Image: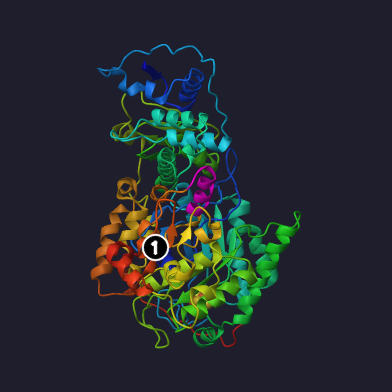
Amino acid sequence: MQLTDKLIVLADAAKYDASCASSGAPKRSSKGQKGLGATNGNGICHSFTPDGRCVALLKILMTNFCLYDCQYCINRRSSNVPRARFSVDEIVRLTLDFYRRNLISGLFLSSGIIRSNDYTMEALVRVARTLRVEHHFRGYIHLKTIPDASPDLIRQAGLHADRLSVNVELPTSQSLNRLAPEKSDTTIRHAMSTIRDGLDEATAEPKAPRFSPGGQSTQMIVGADDTDDHTILGNVQSLYSDYRLKRVYYSAFSPIPESPSSVPLIAPPLLREHRLYQADFLIRGYGFHADELLTGPGNLSLDIDPKLAWALNHRELFPIDLDRADMYMIARVPGIGITSARRIETLRRERRIRYADLTRLGCSMKKLAPFITTQDYRPRQAGLERQALLAQMQTSAPAQMALL
Amino acid sequence: MSMYTLHMTQADFACWRDHARRLLSARVSPGEVLWQSEASAGDLFASSETDLPPPSETPLALKLSKQELRRLECASHYWPSHHQECRWALLYRVVWRLALGEGEALLAGDRDGAVIEQRVKAVNHEVHHIHAFLRFHPQPARAGEQHAPEFIAWFEPRHDVLEAAARHFIDRMGQHSWLIMTPEGAIVCDGRQWHIERPESGAFTLQNYQPLTEMAEDAEDLWLAYYASTFNPARLNEKTMVRSMPSRFWRHMPERVLITGLISHARHGAQQLGQDSRLATRRGRTIALPAKPRH
Ligand code: SF4
């Protein structure tokens, strides 16, 4: 098979994995040195495809031959797709060539499981080692970790990769048992702990070998089973605290060819995925607890974002006075982000806050209006009930519905 | 009130800083200064530089943190459109107010601080754009031209981002030699050091650039194959793509030739799956389990 054909097969096979950001690596430079590549912690999107997704890394599978039969996956052994396998050399050549043209910032490499778990993992590690050691490649490398691979191979992967990830795949262990019978929640979590321990060791002991400096992340497929957002967010919250995860990625399930009857054949739930990312961000960055965002079973509202939904359910806490409130509370106001909250705090050390300041800070005025007071502003809507308020905000701000 | 005209002999931050220091020590208020960039030198109304008054008995001086200075310098890389305020006048008003004790002048909630913030953001955004969307074209080694760069790119930035680009690409490209040409200047790097060359007059154009570049016909084939295949037609979202990758950059990106086709195929095609349609028609292969899976 020609290299171009392999690339088509193995990029198509890898595109359902969303966890391909190129951020979080330590600073590296090739200035004046043999070799190629740099990282500075910030990811770069070198292109965008018409699905609106960022192309930061060369995202491919080493092979889409797979012994497993995960029902949601296009590469499952019972799927009738063209199969291919890259040689180490081909992956290295593609990565370096794309990198020099400034098309990518590194490599995201995953694989179907061939022969055995260790055999597969070993092959992935060999690609990373060749890039780093033989070619002095200093760009970003993200390796997908095979959960059942031996801890020693995971350690070797961490030596060369900037980020390691094990996918939890599905929101609950029941769903995993049903849709991915060869996989086990226990092994997945075990692999995540191995990575976490490696990370802990590298932080605690300055002399410890380098280990995945960009941390670990995971991905969860949404919409392939019927788990609700309440359960998802609860599980996500414990994933963050148990495994030192940098990010959880959500991937709306895309229907696959010859879809087995165990998974739905409907358009991917993109708006739901978007709401989950928003809620996730509130948990990571704003100190929200999963239980605050959804107090009982069910899904996040698709009509309004989770922060607005939370504020509307807590009218008794608002309006708050921007000259006095805690920064923590200011950041909880719909339409005011963390950065703006910090800027409000700095500004009020110089003088009192005025309503017009908020426009200049780029806050979303329609959203925040009912929730704050300043020396020159008081919300007129203070007395309105939740429904009436929501209705009013939505008629005056139709734009906020067009979130995607 | 008298008016003082100051010439920016070099449109750079260092030159402005010298002027600003002298103006502050002479207590010349922002309203009394006319800033003249080299571009407007031929202007009918341009007057020659006027002598500043002697240093005042109560001169103003200003200490700025490194971070604040960097912020001002970054804002000075913004190229205002014709109806926007001259960058040097804005900067001087800000330091004048700071010198008078108006600490808020550099904060994003302030009237001037907000403009500074908006310009800093726009410049940083454009830096990001050149890091992301610039495309290097590898050049075949040409006999007799040892100094010809191995990689060449053309880019049309909106603000002054050349230095930021130079520092970024020298980190990435190691010992490769490269050339980035933009209308306002070119970065030349021999794999060890870089410098910026400005056009002698006017601007560099594609006519200056094209003769330097040699492009093999199939040079982009692998990239185009990848781009089409990594796209998921079941998630079509044109708006986000255009918002994140403004179309003004497409002209010099090889994938431009695919975009419209991929969109219309995803929208009207019978296939509502994520799979690349080129694969749907190919012969596939299911896999039989080995007698005993080895784990
Ligand atoms: S192990 Fe499962 S998810 Fe991974 S490639 Fe094989 S079938 Fe797909």
Task: From the viewer's perspective, tell me whether residue A391 is left or right of residue A17.
Answer: left
Who's the residue at 59% across and 42% down the image? A34
Magenta-colored segment: predominant secondary structure: helix
In the displayed structure image, the side of residue B173 where residue B78 appears, left or right: left
Label total for image: 1
Q: Nearer the viewer, residue A210 or B177?
A: A210
Where does residue B191 sit, x and y in percent of width and height? 53, 36
- Tell me the quarter of the image containing the N terminus of chain A: bottom left
Under tag 1, what secondary structure? helix
Chain to which the residue tagged by mark 1 belongs: A
Depth check: A360 or B285 in front? A360
Q: Is residue A349 magenta?
A: yes
Residue A278, position in %: x, y? 46, 66
Front one among B291 and A353: A353
Q: Is residue B28 above or below residue A312?
A: above
Residue A307: x and y, percent?
45, 67
The reply to whether residue A276 is visible in this rendering is: no
Instruction: From the image, tell me which residue sits under label 1.
Output: A370
Q: In which quarter of the image is residue A3?
A: bottom left
Is residue B87 visible in the rendered structure shown here? Answer: yes
Placement of the C terminus of chain A among the 4 image quadrants: bottom left
**Would residue B199 be counted in the magenta stretch?**
no
Percent position (x, y) of residue B271? 29, 74
Q: As drawn, is A354 to the left or to the right of A288? A: left
Start and end of the magenta stretch? A339-352
* A129, above or below A361, in the image: below
Work out whether residue A317 or residue A292 is closer to the camera in this orientation and state it. Answer: A317
